[in-house]
Image (tube, rainbow, N blue to C red):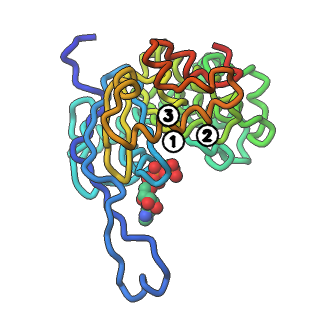
């Protein structure tokens, strides 16, 4: 990989305005006021890295995720994918983008079709990428292995799977498209703490083995800090700070980051280390121990 390769993703001064959510009556009167759910956000994701996006509820994380996968268009600002402005992509390039940027959702209960068996979910993704029927079986087996699911699971419907297994299927479906970038919006917040670590470890493995770039979103700093190489902290639509976790967590520049950090130990309840703050642990270079979720295999 050449060092001057452009970042896989770069956001420049991205802004997204919505009309303020308010009562029906006010809306009918046309009294809606625009507000910025995302306000002047800029960051870059180097190819092959994991970028962690953290922030409280309503800070604009999912809005950013939707902009990155182009479910919605920003009000203003520029987004570059592989160095190319996505606003100016021709039809073929836009199609490549759609395949190349995949999303993993929080709620696999509703993002997976309840009437489709796992086999079909994966088969459809492979077909969309143009994998031939002849190659689909091998490819499916490889994907299942990669996400840690046994092949008998292929015959199951989503409701016959645990939350963790469903999330693995969601990841397999995304990987079936052979993406360049994976956007995972709160991929573990619906899971038990013990499973959270396993899914995060899986994403980390996939990043390491495939070199897949990942934007990992969570309201929980402890979830992302352990695996990301850079961290962006969102508050009220702004990215209030960003940098490697070793810097952001040890020497946070923004008061809001300190608030987030202060909230972390309670999220690690049940560990013997609870009296030690995450910041102390990071300062001591004990990052993995500080953020490993309870019951994780690592
Ligand atoms: N379609 C929409 N119309 C109007 N307002 C919206 C819309 N989508 C999001 N918002 C508002 O934009 C702000 C940011 O929402 P967003 O979902 O991006 O936050 P978030 O950081 O993902 O929060 P959470 O942690 O709860 O998922 C919120 O105030 C939300 O109410
Ligand atoms: Mg969200």
Residue 211 vs residue 88, the one in the foreground: 211
Find out if the beta carbon at label 1 lies less than 8 Å from the nearest ligand 1 atom. Answer: yes
Query: Mark 2 and mark 3: span between their CA atoms?
Result: 12 Å
Q: Are marks 1 and 2 in contact (CB under 8 Å)?
A: yes
Mark toward the start of the polypeptide (2 vs 3): 2
Q: Quadrant of ligand 1?
A: bottom left
Say if 285 sits above or below 140 in the image.
above
- The residue wearing badge 3 is 221
* Residue 213 position within the rendered picture, expressed as x and y whole percent measured from the top left: 40, 25
Residue 268 vs residue 31, the one in the foreground: 268
- The residue wearing badge 1 is 219
Query: Mark 1 and mark 3: span between their CA atoms?
Result: 6 Å
Position of 132 with respect to 190 (left or right) is left
Mark toward the start of the polypeptide (1 vs 2): 2
Q: Tell which residue pokes out farthest to the front in this image.
A: 275
- The residue wearing badge 2 is 189
Position of 210 with respect to 201 (left or right) is left
* Residue 1 position within the rendered picture, expressed as x and y whole percent measured from the top left: 28, 10
């Amino acid at each position: 990989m050449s060092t001057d390769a452009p970042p896989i993703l770069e956001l420049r001064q991205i802004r997204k305005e919505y009309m303020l959510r308010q009562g029906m009556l006010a809306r009918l009167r046309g009294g809606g006021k625009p507000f910025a759910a995302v306000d002047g956000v800029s960051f870059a994701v180097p190819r092959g890295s994991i970028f962690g996006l953290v922030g409280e509820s309503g800070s604009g994380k999912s809005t950013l995720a939707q902009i990155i996968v182009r479910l919605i268009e920003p009000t203003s600002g520029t987004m570059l994918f592989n160095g190319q402005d996505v606003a100016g992509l021709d039809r073929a390039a836009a199609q490549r983008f759609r395949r190349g940027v995949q999303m993993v959702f929080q709620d696999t209960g509703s993002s997976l079709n309840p009437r489709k068996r796992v086999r079909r979910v994966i088969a459809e993704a492979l077909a969309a990428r143009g994998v031939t029927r002849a190659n689909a079986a091998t490819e499916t087996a490889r994907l299942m292995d990669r996400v840690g699911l046994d092949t008998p699971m292929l015959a199951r419907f989503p409701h016959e799977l645990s939350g963790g297994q469903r999330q693995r299927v969601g990841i397999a479906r995304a990987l079936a498209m052979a993406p360049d970038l994976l956007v995972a919006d709160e991929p573990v917040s619906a899971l038990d703490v013990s499973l959270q670590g396993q899914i995060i470890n899986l994403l980390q493995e996939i990043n390491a083995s495939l070199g897949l770039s990942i934007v990992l979103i969570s309201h929980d700093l402890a979830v992302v800090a352990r695996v990301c190489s850079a961290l962006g902290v969102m508050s009220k639509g702004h990215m209030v700070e960003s940098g490697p976790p070793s810097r952001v967590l040890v020497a946070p520049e923004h008061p809001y980051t300190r608030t987030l950090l202060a909230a972390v130990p309670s999220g690690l309840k049940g560990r013997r280390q609870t009296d030690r703050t995450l910041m102390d642990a990071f300062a001591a270079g004990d990052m993995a121990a500080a953020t490993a979720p309870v019951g994780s295999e690592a």
